[in-house]
Image: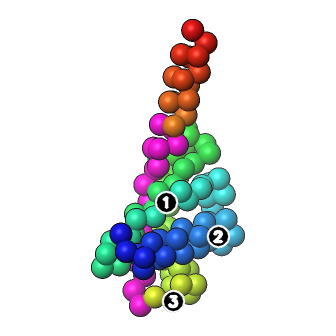
């Protein structure tokens, strides 16, 4: 991945986190953590990976995030100076739960 895309990914990740924390009025978004972004090379799409503190409501939160993506994209346009703001699509980041599962397995092995 080239340096420009990495820099844009980092800027999008930071700004989306700030927007979710401060700008969006939906209380479900207060406990969302942006873990990674993956922007296409032509800057038309961006996959935003998030984790949710409340796992029981993660599907509803992801649906609400994808519904609010146009508002978040508009806020990004005000904050990031690039020609085209990519279309945002939110996905749940399974790596955190996968890591927790690995930790449990290691702890279980160490107990035996």
Q: Can you say whether 112 is above or below 85 in the image?
A: above
Q: Would you place residue 36 above or below residue 78 in this image? A: above
> Which residue is denoted by mark 3 in the rendering?
81
The residue shown at (46%, 50%) is 92
Q: Secondary structure at mark 2?
A: helix
Q: Is residue 9 visible?
A: yes
Q: CA distance from mark 3 to mark 2?
A: 16 Å
Report helix, strand or loop for mark 1.
Answer: strand
The residue at which mark 1 appears reads as 36
> Residue 49, how many percent across, how many down?
47, 57
**Cα–Cα span, label 2 and label 1:** 14 Å
Q: Which residues are magenta?
A: 83-98
Which label's residue is closer to the chain start, 3 or 2? Answer: 2
Q: In front: 93, or 4? A: 4
Q: Quadrant of residue 78?
A: bottom right
What is the spatial separation of the Cα atoms under label 3 and label 1, in whole angstroms? 20 Å
Asked whether 67 or 112 is in front, the reply is 112
Q: Residues within 10 Å of mark 2 (few under 14, many from 20)?
A: few
Q: Nearer the viewer, residue 71 or 104?
A: 104
Sequence-first disc among 2 and 1 = 2
Which residue sits at x=52%, y=43%? 96
Residue beneath the point at 62% across and 45% down = 53
């Amino acid at each position: 991945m080239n340096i420009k895309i990495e820099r844009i990914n980092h800027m999008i990740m930071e700004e989306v986190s700030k927007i979710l924390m401060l700008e969006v009025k939906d209380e479900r978004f207060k406990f969302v953590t942006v873990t990674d972004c993956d922007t296409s090379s032509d800057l038309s799409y961006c996959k935003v990976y998030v984790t949710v503190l409340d796992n029981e409501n993660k599907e509803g939160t992801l649906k609400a995030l994808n519904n609010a993506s146009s508002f978040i994209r508009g806020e990004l346009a005000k904050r990031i100076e690039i020609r085209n703001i990519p279309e945002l699509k939110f996905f749940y980041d399974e790596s955190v739960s996968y890591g927790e599962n690995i930790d449990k397995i290691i702890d279980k092995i160490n107990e035996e």
